[in-house]
């Protein structure tokens, strides 16, 4: 669990949000700490006036105070390391310190994009597109096997509407569809290779 500790300079109360002249920065910082707690971050706050023992007991804090004195306060420690000294960080800075809101790595890599483009080229009957994206995929290290799988998938998806419309035509005209047209139009997902039913797939 992520953890943040705030060591405040001498103030009238533990947050400084009291008295007739309240610093709006302290109000905002208090709100930001509450927001962190709502995100599941462990938040601890110590005031030099109220809890001086907390400053002495933390070796990291004690070392910074020995070097800089009270000028080091406020001091923000994130996951056991000094993150900010001498100022209160903004919410955006707190997010950055704790790694909150980071975007997960995308699965849509350049290699995947080329496989998608190859499938689209098959669907569009675009020879120049297929040649180009086949070459680009090769440059990215995409294997011939993966390209072949993308082509096979695209071909099955593309052919499914034709098979389906021919089956409908056969029913409407009360004629028998050809053997090829009678084959299930299920998308290739590995199930057919394993003898499993592909019922309910996108183009069955």
Image (cartoon, rainbow, N blue to C red):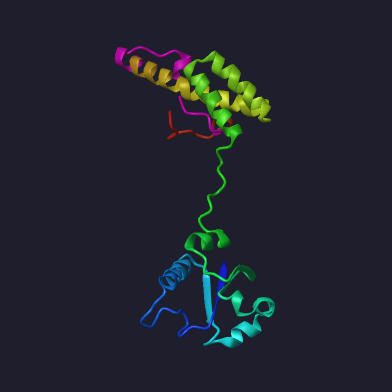
Front-most of residues 155 and 185: 155
Residue 195 is covered by the magenta coloring: no
Q: Could you tell whether 45 is left or right of 25 in the image?
A: right
**Residue 181 visible in the snapshot:** yes
Q: Nearer the viewer, residue 120 or 165?
A: 120
Is 37 on the left or on the right of 62, as rendered?
Answer: left
Residue 60 placement (x, y as % from top left): 67, 76
Above/below status of 69 relative to 166: below
The quarter of the picture where the C terminus appears is: top left
Give the main secondary structure of the magenta stretch: loop
- Above or below, comparing residue 110 to residue 96 in the picture: above
- Can residue 183 be seen here? The reply is no
**Figure quadrant of the N terminus:** bottom right
Count of numbered marks: 0
- Using the image, determine if residue 29 lies above or below residue 99: below
* Residue stretch in magenta: 170-191
What's the residue at 48%, 63% (across, down)?
91
| Residue 70, horizontal then vertical, whole percent | 60, 79
- Residue 46: horizontal and vertical position, in percent? 54, 81
Which quadrant of the structure image shows residue 106?
A: top right
Residue for point 57% across, 62% down: 97
Write down the quadrant of residue 48 in the picture. Answer: bottom right
Q: Nearer the viewer, residue 57 or 112?
A: 57
At x 63% / y 29%, what residue is drawn? 146
Residue 189 painted magenta: yes
Residue 92: x and y in percent read 49, 59
């Amino acid at each position: 669990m992520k953890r943040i500790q705030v060591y405040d300079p001498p103030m009238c109360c533990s947050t400084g949000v009291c008295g007739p002249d309240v610093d709006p920065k302290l109000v905002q910082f208090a709100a930001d700490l509450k927001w962190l707690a709502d995100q599941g971050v462990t938040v601890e706050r110590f005031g030099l006036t109220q809890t001086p023992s907390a400053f002495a007991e933390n070796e990291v804090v004690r070392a910074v105070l020995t070097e800089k004195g009270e000028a080091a306060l406020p001091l923000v420690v994130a996951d056991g390391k000094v993150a900010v000294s001498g100022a209160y960080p903004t919410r955006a800075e707190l997010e950055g310190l704790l790694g909150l809101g980071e975007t997960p790595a995308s699965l849509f890599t350049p290699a995947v994009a080329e496989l998608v483009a190859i499938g689209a080229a098959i669907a569009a009957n675009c020879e120049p597109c297929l040649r180009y994206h086949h070459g680009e995929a090769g440059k990215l290290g995409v294997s011939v096997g993966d390209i072949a799988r993308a082509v096979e998938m695209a071909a099955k998806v593309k052919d499914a509407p034709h098979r389906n419309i021919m089956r409908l035509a056969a029913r409407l005209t009360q004629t028998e569809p050809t053997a090829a047209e009678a084959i299930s139009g299920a998308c290739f997902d590995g199930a057919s290779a394993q003898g499993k039913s592909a019922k309910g797939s996108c183009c069955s």
